[in-house]
Amino acid sequence: MLANKPSSALTQSPSSRCSRPSRRGMFIIRWLSRALPLPHAHNKLSTPYLHEEQYQPPSWANPYIKLVPHSRLGLAQLPTPVHRWHLPGLPEGVEVFIKRDDITGMQLYAGLDCHLVLRTSRQVVDSDPGLTGNLLVSRLVGATLHLVTKEEYAREGSMRLGQAVVDKLRAQGKNPYLVPVGGSSALGTWGYLQASEELRQQTSGMGISDVVMACGSGGTSAGLCLGLHLAMPNPRIAVHAYGVCDDPDYFYDYIDGLLTELGVWDGKGGTSSVPSARGLLRVVQARGTGYAMSTDAELQTMKEVAEETGVILDPVYSGKAIHGLIAEMRASPQAWQGRRVLFLHTGGLLGMYDKEDQLRQLLGGKQGYGHKVERLEVNTTSSSGADVRLQVGDVQHGMMQ
């Protein structure tokens, strides 16, 4: 994502939960993530909307992390709640909780123009991309879309394509800032470094043994595994990142790179206090048939979770992660016996609209509406006072009685 600098008041574009500090030390939050809570010394976990203040990292971050932002801008409703989650089909002896980062109430209005580089197929790259899912919201708030083919994206890479847009905007006299895929930069990890402090306060005494999340670009996983390692050292919490693209080795190497940029790992084996990524978390392959490609089994899991718990997952990230987690638990129930697992739900609801055709089949019925849709029988009174019975219809099959 790219953003132009409209004035000296805000000099950087959004990043993961935060972005790189400018000359003024500004540190802002990406639209898909959460604003940072106030420092623990203030004894609260929220900050007024669009309010800038000096940032003080949690005490456990010193002296391990050398790259630290200077200030932050509040854009979310925090803390997000943590509650018990009765997932269907869990083996006995396992308890699951969920942290609802899908309901941060996220907003971003800071006078920034937004430019998005999006990949699509060769067949439609020269056509209007439509209004499905995130495209609807992105276009509604005025984002400019720059479309490339999947082949161009693979050949050039996201950073070179983004830099091409940066150069174009600079030629127009604008001052853009390039945000990498997912906002997963070293400074972007600070969002979930701070979230680790939020979790430390919220889960004190709960006996959480494992934290699980989806992993798409690595920034969230990097911030959380490092933050939990430093903030909650005794007992250690096992961190599991379910990768929805690429492979585990890629994510381990990418997270090691972020740790090096943060100044917490020397890239040559780590230190006694902070190990490499392979010592901080376990990355599990959960991409299925491919990134953003859903199997019927994954969507069925999402449907069951929604019906049983009321929590809506998304098909690209959280849905794949939960499908993989439940599959692991069912395959090896003894390995999870006695565990108290917390799942981080990072949102993505709008991605469901892209799966309408597949979901219609899962919901049942020839037209895909299912047996739960029917015409309501209504009794009313005519002008003469006589009761009139309206026709009752079976919506699924278009039959009237």
Image (cartoon, rainbow, N blue to C red):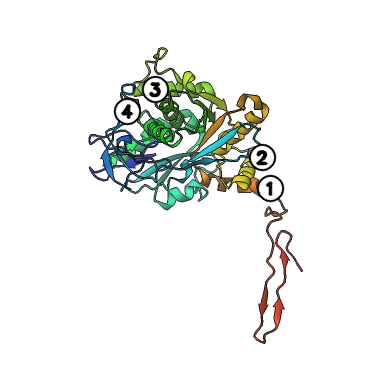
**Farthest right residue in view:** 401
**Which circle's residue, 3 or 4, is located before the other in the chain?**
4
Q: Which residue is mark 2?
A: 296
Mark 4 highlights which residue? 59
- In three-dimensional space, the C-alpha distance between marks 2 and 1, rounded to whole angstroms, equals 9 Å
* Callout in the foreground (3, 2): 3
User: Of the residues shown, which amino acid type is indicated by label 3?
Assistant: Leu
Q: Amino acid at mark 2?
A: Asp
Q: Does the CB distance between marks 2 and 1 fall below 8 Å? A: yes
Residue 316 seen by the camera: no
Q: Quadrant of the N terminus?
A: top left
Q: Residues within 10 Å of mark 2 (few under 14, many from 20)?
A: few
Distance CA(mark 1)–CA(mark 4): 52 Å
Quarter of the image with the C terminus in it: bottom right
Name which residue lies at 67% across and 71% down. Answer: 378
Image spot of residue 199 (x, y percent):
43, 34
Inspect this view and state whether residue 88 appears: yes
Residue lying at the far bottom in this picture: please name it: 384
* Of the image marks 4 and 2, the number of the one nearer the N terminus: 4
Task: Tell me which numbered mark, 3 or 1, is placed earlier along the sequence.
Answer: 3
Which numbered disc covers residue 259? 3
**Measured Cα–Cα span from mark 4 to mark 2:** 46 Å
Dot 2 or dot 1, earlier in sequence? 2
